[in-house]
Image: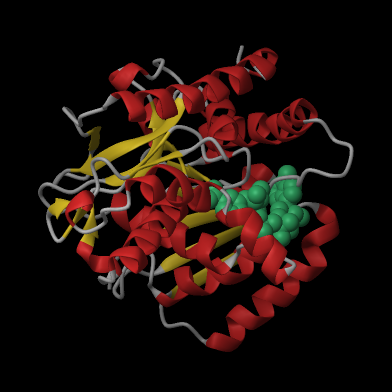
Amino acid sequence: MKTPITVSVTGAAGQIGYALLFRIASGAMFGPDQPVNLRLIEIEPAMGALEGVIMELDDCAFPLLNEVVATSDLNVGFSGANWALLVGSVPRKAGMERADLLKINGGIFTGQGKAIAENAADDIRVVVVGNPCNTNALIAMNSAAGVPNDRFFAMTRLDENRAKSQLAAKANVHNSDITNMCIWGNHSATQYPDFTNAKIKGQPVTDFIKDQEWLEGEFISTVQQRGAAIIKARGASSAASAANGLVDTVRALTTPTPAGDWTSICVCSDGSYGIDAGLIASMPIFVKEDGSWDVVPGVEVDAFSREKIDASVQELRDEKAAVADLLA
Ligand SMILES: NC(=O)c1ccc[n+]([C@@H]2O[C@H](COP(=O)([O-])OP(=O)(O)OC[C@H]3O[C@@H](n4cnc5c(N)ncnc54)[C@H](O)[C@@H]3O)[C@@H](O)[C@H]2O)c1
């Protein structure tokens, strides 16, 4: 057995937390021979519910679960963390402006970024799920003095999975036949699922799907609006598929990317593809044998894609401007 790794999860008593923790503890995220310590972080009012979740974790008697700590103290919560999965955030309430939401959550991620810098392990990696996840990750990154920028990520893997599933259904092929699916920009309704570079059985999507109007219209809007469609149908937001997206994200970051393929993750831009350096934006990423990652170079961006990417990047700039005072 390997030495246990420490995984901190915020919002652990929430809906995604409930779908996520059992998959981490079962080995789905870090593999069947990797024991884990869980540090579960919640706000005080949710500590009772968190105790219930921990009772259920106990009742699974997971062989890989080494230790569980429940806390609302960030210094305890991020102590020795190898991974920080920042799921908790405050949802938008009726009458709340987007700028107010950005500021409220911004306050949370400043404190968490600082506590990560002061308490986490040297190899800490941070994945933000709580929305607005790109800008929350930007704030955490800017607050975590001494932690390299390339350790901060935000999640668009759920969007990538949604896009693959839509293409597979339309082309009447299996999900696993779809590769090179990139989500560009913000995890929001402006995101751009790039069908122009995606492949089906190694061929351009248009070899299988001749309906260009569907690709440029309904396909994009279905992926962009999928979260809202699930809330409408289920009466609650996507939690199991979001947790699954996070399992996939961490696995993608800990496994070399198959040659020629890529994965969508929001990372700190180096200025590639006309995305301002320093913004946390989704782009095509590959993970190397040594565990480091890079932006995939040379992906073709045609005029249609350029316009869509620019619109989403502009939204990220606007979000950054709205929280400028938190980025000092
Ligand atoms: N990036 C994505 O693809 C994606 C997909 C789905 C959902 N999300 C986002 O994930 C977040 C969580 O979703 P959910 O369905 O689990 O929501 P939820 O409301 O069920 O749970 C959120 C939890 O976070 C906790 N929390 C709030 N502030 C906290 C803080 N400061 N520290 C620690 N915990 C705190 C709450 O007590 C609650 O238990 C939401 O922001 C949602 O929009 C992102």
Front residue of 10/229: it is: 229
Tell me: residue 192, above or below residue 17: above
Query: In the rendered view of the protein, which quadrant contains the N terminus?
Result: bottom left
Query: In the rendered view of the protein, which quadrant contains the C terminus?
Result: top right
Tell me: residue 305, above or below residue 255: above
Q: Is residue 141 left or right of residue 16?
A: left
Front residue of 178/6: it is: 178
In percent of width and height, residue 114 lies at 60, 30
Front residue of 235/58: it is: 235
Q: Is residue 124 left or right of residue 70?
A: left
Tell me: residue 51, above or below residue 122: below
Q: Is residue 229 left or right of residue 252?
A: right
Q: Seen from this angle, which residue lies furthest right?
A: 95
Residue 234 occupies quadrant: bottom right
In percent of width and height, residue 24 lies at 46, 68
Residue 54 occupies quadrant: bottom right
Q: Is residue 101 left or right of residue 109?
A: right
Determine the residue positioned at 37% across, 54% down: 250
Any part of residue 26 in sight: yes
In percent of width and height, residue 196 lies at 26, 40
Determine the residue positioned at 31% across, 23% down: 303
Tell me: residue 61, above or below residue 78: below
Any part of residue 69 in sight: no
In percent of width and height, residue 77 lies at 62, 50
Determine the residue positioned at 47% across, 82% down: 62
